[in-house]
Image (cartoon, helix red, strand yellow):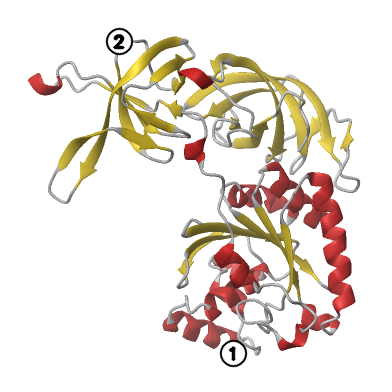
Amino acid sequence: MSTLLRLATAGSVDDGKSTLVGRLLHDCKAILADQIAHVKTVSEARGGDFDFALLTDGLRAEREQGITIDVAYRYFATDKRSFILADCPGHVQYTRNTVTGASTADVVIILVDARHGVLEQTRRHLAVAGLLRVPHVVLAVNKIDLVGYDEAVFTKIAKDVNEVADQLGIADIQAIPVSALVGDNVVDKSGATDWYDGPTLLEYLENADGRIDNSQQPLRFPVQYVIRPQTDDEYRDYRGYTGTVASGTVSVGDQVIVLPAGRRTSVAGIDRAVVTATSTAVVERPSAVAGEAVTVRLADDLDVARGSVIVAAEASPGTRRELAATVSWLSDRPLTVGARVLIKHTTTTAQAIVTKITGALDLDTLGVIDATELALNDIGKVQLKIAAPLAADPYSRNTITGSFLLIDAHDGWTLAAGMIDDEEGELL
């Protein structure tokens, strides 16, 4: 079990996400005394009780409107592990922020107001979690105190959410009845829900597994920069390719293929910079694993540049100029067939054109419906033709080389987050 867990919150407006996060941080004693004193003063000035949401709503507009606008990242730790938490907005127009926060999460906590049950935004956030293949989903049925701690209400909501999760292919979902305001089942077990024998929210988070270890996947090493110092005799002939190992392990002597050229060679050396307060030294390494930033030297002088990908010779993904993908559309401007965009895939940026929109996800039925365009917050299937070959995997096999961004070539705005489909091309 990894000692670091990344989690994100999601849910509809006023479901109590910021209050839950504030309560979690407060009860874990992750809030400084002066912050608590400030929130207490502000809460009293407003004539109310201690407002836990103010511990996380950092923007002035958020405090004034009582809503979360941006993704608020918080870092805290318990005796068992450390956490990076992304508190995501609930408004529909900020779904793009939820995609951002959930994209790296090991656990997504989806809140549902016990009084209102499953809403469209609940289904949308479940769809995002399924699309991004987040390993674990927690259903926090919040405000359970406002329905008299009724077990039947909790059971009905959990059943409804599990039905949606089954349709979306979400395998691991844990339902927990909570009251963020009172503190029931957040950190401490609640005596008011004696019918619930599962973990508290914190207990679940402390014991949840992280994402799949990318080091067990085939080698993918996107080249970010070519190093040719040519400064002195020691490095006059040095040629190294710098980047972060996206997946797998690379070792000296490994047989590799450089894509898109398709040339085969072997790894001659692996270097890593060691930086101290007074100096920088280059240290040779026998190997490097996923997540490490290193410089790889190859046995042959090949045409390697930024955007090239060094892959395991025995497990090459090949290259493709056409993609079938599922995208979460993040722009106010609708996507239509024929749109010309930039695709950002690992370290490659290339021109692309949308050749087909296959369909969109209907959040009411969770079926695929015909669509001629995708609007803001739509999740749909598209086909792309790309000007340069990409060394890409299906997202289900590799979340790094299987994902991409679509960017507006004129103003640089991010238009969509995309996941490359398997050959069968399922929407989720």
Q: Nearer the viewer, residue 242 or 357?
A: 242
How many C-alpha atoms fall within 10 Å of the one at disc 1: few (<14), some, or many (≥20)? few
Pointer 1 with pointer 2, Cβ within 8 A? no
Residue in view at x 56 percent, y 45 percent: 212
Q: Secondary structure at mark 1?
A: helix
Amino acid type indicated by mark 1: Glu
Query: Could you say where residue 366 lies in the image, as x and y percent from the top left?
Result: 86, 44
Q: Nearer the viewer, residue 375 or 251?
A: 251
How many C-alpha atoms fall within 10 Å of the one at disc 2: few (<14), some, or many (≥20)? few
Query: Could you say where residue 325 lies in the image, as x and y percent from the top left?
Result: 70, 28
Amino acid type indicated by mark 2: Asp
What is the number of the mark on residue 44? 1
**Residue 409 can be seen in this image:** no
Task: State which tag comes first along the sequence, 1 or 2.
Answer: 1
Relative vertical location of residue 283 with respect to residue 192 in this rendering, above or below: above
Q: CA distance from mark 1 to mark 2?
A: 69 Å
Q: Is residue 63 left or right of residue 160?
A: left
Residue in view at x 51 percent, y 77 percent: 28
Q: Quadrant of residue 386?
A: top right
Q: Which residue is mark 2?
A: 301
Q: Secondary structure at mark 2?
A: loop
Q: Nearer the viewer, mark 1 or mark 2?
A: 2
Viewport quadrant of the C terminus = top right
Relative vertical location of residue 54 with respect to residue 49 in this rendering, above or below: above
Query: Could you say where residue 193 lies in the image, as x and y percent from the top left?
Result: 77, 83
**Residue 8 can be seen in this image:** yes
What is the number of the mark on residue 173? none
Q: Nearer the viewer, residue 248 or 4?
A: 248
Residue in view at x 44 percent, y 27 percent: 222
Query: Could you say where residue 17 lies in the image, as x and y percent from the top left?
Result: 67, 68
Q: Is residue 424 left or right of residue 242?
A: right
